[in-house]
Image (spheres, rainbow, N blue to C red):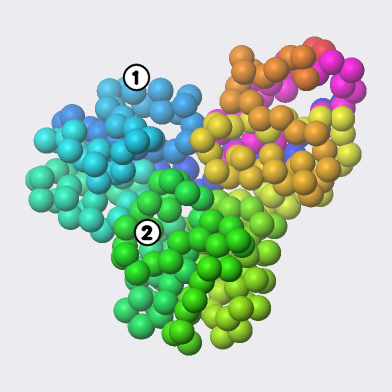
Amino acid sequence: MIINKISPQGYCGGVINALKIVNEAILNTSIKRPIYLLGNIIHNKHVVNDLKDKGIIVLEDKSKTRLELLDNITSGTVIFSAHGVSPLVYEKAKNKGLNIIDAICPNVNIVHKNILKHLNDGYKCIYIGTKNHPECEGVLGISNDIIFISSDIDIDSLDLSNNKIYATNQTTLSKYDLKDIYDKLINKYPNIIIDDKICNATTIRQEAMANQEKVDLCIVVGDKESSNTKKLVKVSQNIAGIKTILCEDLSSLDKNELKNINSVSISSGASTPSYIVDEIIEYLKKQ
């Protein structure tokens, strides 16, 4: 079987930074215990389970916001995930007397600051993202005045009279989907300020997927909850035109998909440990 490993792979800078912060907290005996993670630090079950084994308490409930999850913490240290949190979460954690550690991705932090600046300057702010994603929850919690859209269809119902309009986005969206949305916004509001904030790591991986060599099957390795991982699958299918499957690890790889396959490409999300990909590659070499 021919195996094409698509680069880049491994953790992005934001994930490396977040995990460094958490592991330093674990080793620092002066930090108040217990240590809580408010939501999964990144979207990868293997990484999160490893942190649990090290004594971290992870609070994750899809039916609750980060603000609501804070109700489960009465003392100790709370770590905010790489996805970022709203100012209300900060304020609530502070009022509860918790030790706060922020592992927000630097790229997400820039989005927060830029939106706040433009709101203060009198702009109507449009934010493009994925419904119920924790990164979006953090941004939308900045102000109720932020207009959220998740597709170009949402633009049809917009009726903005303010000539000062600013638009930005979740950092892990598909650059190809986002272009269509921004083009439509520009067509409707020619004076709009567009601030594309898809992170560089996401863009490079998507471009590599779009330009990959033709193979019988593409395998994307990553968590099913990971936005950037799911976007890689979509780019491979829709842009490169290659049959693509998503798996979290070797145990979840559907071996039936490998029947009559002579060539595969393999990529991974920005929060997927390299050893998981390597394990799958070693398996494929034996087929």
Q: Is residue 281 magenta?
A: yes
Question: Which mark is on residue 140?
Answer: 2
Task: Tell me the amino acid under the disc marked 1.
Answer: Asp
Crowd band around label 2 with a 10 angstrom C-alpha radius: few (<14), some (14–19), many (20+): some
| Residue range corresponding to the magenta coloring | 258-283
Q: Quadrant of residue 106?
A: bottom left
Coordinates of residue 271 in the picture (x, y in percent): 53, 38
Quarter of the image containing the N terminus? top right
Is residue 50 shown left or right of residue 274? left
Q: Earlier in the sequence, mark 1 or mark 2?
A: 1
Residue position marked by numbered label 1 in the rendering: 53
Q: Is residue 164 magenta?
A: no
Task: Tell me the amino acid under the disc marked 2.
Answer: Leu
Which secondary structure, mark 1? helix
**Figure check: 94 above or below 145:** above
**Circles 1 and 2: CB atoms closer than 8 Å:** no
The number of callouts visible is 2
Question: Which mark is on residue 19?
Answer: none
Residue at 87% x, 30% y is: 216
Coordinates of residue 129 in the picture (x, y in percent): 51, 55
Q: CA distance from mark 1 to mark 2?
A: 33 Å
Residue at 77% x, 46% y is: 238
